[in-house]
Every structure is written in structure tokens, then in C-alpha cells.
Amino acid sequence: MNCPTCGAPVPSDATQCEYCGSRLALAACPSCFGMVFAGAKFCSHCGAAIERTEVASQVKELCPRCRLGMEEVLIGKAKLHECPKCQGIWADTDTLQQIYSDREQQAAVLGTAAPLPQEGEGFETNIRYIPCPVCNKLMNRINFAHCSHVIVDVCREHGTWFDKDELRRIVEFIRAGGLDKARADQITELERQREELRSDRISQSLSMPMPAGQSNYYGDVGMGLASAAGHLIEGLFFK
């Protein structure tokens, strides 16, 4: 591939020309938010038509990694802020909710089209907490939906920071039914905790001495079950 500005040869995955400094890749797909080569008309990830509009902004929030002013862009109907150097994306809470909702509806209509990410895929090795572009407080690092294997930086009040190409990976996760899996896993875990708590309460009740004249309900039940089991074994093996 060649740089559209100076014509120098560049790798297909390059985001910036090492000769003239021109940007080569940018987030521009309104469907999957994938990175595309500058000048492309269709997304190389999903085939959707490119729809990106840069918006003039008087106040530029700083990229939490590069500390450079971010550019405000409209990708489809989503208003995002993008760092021209590292290609990270900042999305406010309302915009993200709309993106997640729209992609989950698409998943419900189209069905699961791709496998969910495998365990261990995409985790960072150099961990660094970064500040929220709005309030400047350090953000929390969260594994999106607890099972996506995509670690994003979240300010609960203001929004989420996605490093290069992470938003596309999140969209693919949602379209593959990842949120349904996350909900099912959460329900399973809650049921496990409930059963564990119930077992602990029964064990405590069985081990607790009861005042004279009072019956231990769980103890009575346990004795009854033991007696019934004894009769059943006797009937099976000794008759």
C-alpha cells in the first residue's frame, strides 16, 4: 500500500506514514466502528459504507494516553472523540448505551454470526491507569461484560475509553451474543451463591444445640431422610 499524501510504501496495518506523518487509518465504519485505510469507501471488516464527519470543536478534551487534543467525529449517528495519534476513542455514557442497544438488536435479528473471543485474547501486558478526559480522575479497568476479554477504561459518570480497535471488538462481541452469555453466566453464579448460602444455613442449624423441649426442624428432616435411606437400602439388598 502507498501513502495517499506522499506516495511512500506503507504496511497495510500502519496508522501513520513514517515519511510524511499523514494519518493512514481512522475509525470510520458506522456499523462496526472498525479502523479503515484513509480514502476507503467501504469497511474492510464488515463491508459497510464509510460514514465519517469531522466536527469543529472549540474545546478539545485531551487524550488520556497521549495528552493531545482529541477530534470530535460523527461516525454514523454516534458522536465520538478520537485521538489523532494513538487512534483511541472516547465515548460518553449516553452514546455508548445507544451503540450497545443498537448492536444487541442487530444480534437478535441476525443471530450469532461469529464465535465469542477466546480466553486470554487481547489482554494488555503493560498496565497503566489513565485519567478520565472530563473529570481527570483515574478510571477503572474493566473486562467488558466480565467475559469479553476486552479490557476498557471506564469513568462511571462520564464515559469509556477504548484503545485502538477495542470498540470494534466490543461490537463483534455483542453481535456474537456475548451479552446474552454474560447475563446467563451471572444468573448461574447467583443461583450458585444462593444454594451455597442455603447449605451453610442448614449446616449451622444442624450443629446448633436446641433448648430442651424444642425440635430442630433441619435435624428432624435429616433424621427422617437417614431413616428412609436405611429402609431403602435394607429393602434392596436384604430382601
Image (cartoon, rainbow, N blue to C red):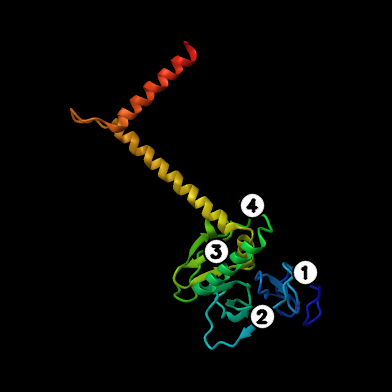
Q: How far apart are marks 2 and 3 (CA)?
A: 23 Å
Residue 52 circle label: 2
**First-in-chain label (4 vs 2):** 2
Q: What residue type is labelled 1?
A: Pro
**First-in-chain label (4 vs 3):** 4
Q: In which quarter of the image is the N terminus?
A: bottom right
Residue 39 in the image, given as x and y percentages of width and height: 75, 79
Residue 152 circle label: 3
Instruction: Determine the residue located farthest toward the top in the rendered image.
Output: 239
Question: Disc 4 marks which residue?
Answer: 118
Residue 197 in the image, given as x and y percentages of width and height: 38, 42
Q: Can residue 147 be seen in this view?
A: no
User: Mark 2: which secondary structure?
Assistant: strand
> Could you tell me if the residues under marks 2 and 3 are in contact, i.e. CB atoms within 8 Å?
no
Q: Crowdedness of circle 2 by 10 Å Cα count: few (<14), some, many (20+)?
A: some
Residue 102 circle label: none
Q: How far apart are marks 1 and 3 (CA)?
A: 27 Å
Question: Disc 1 marks which residue?
Answer: 11
> Could you tell me if the residues under marks 4 and 2 are in contact, i.e. CB atoms within 8 Å?
no
Pair 4/3: label in front: 4
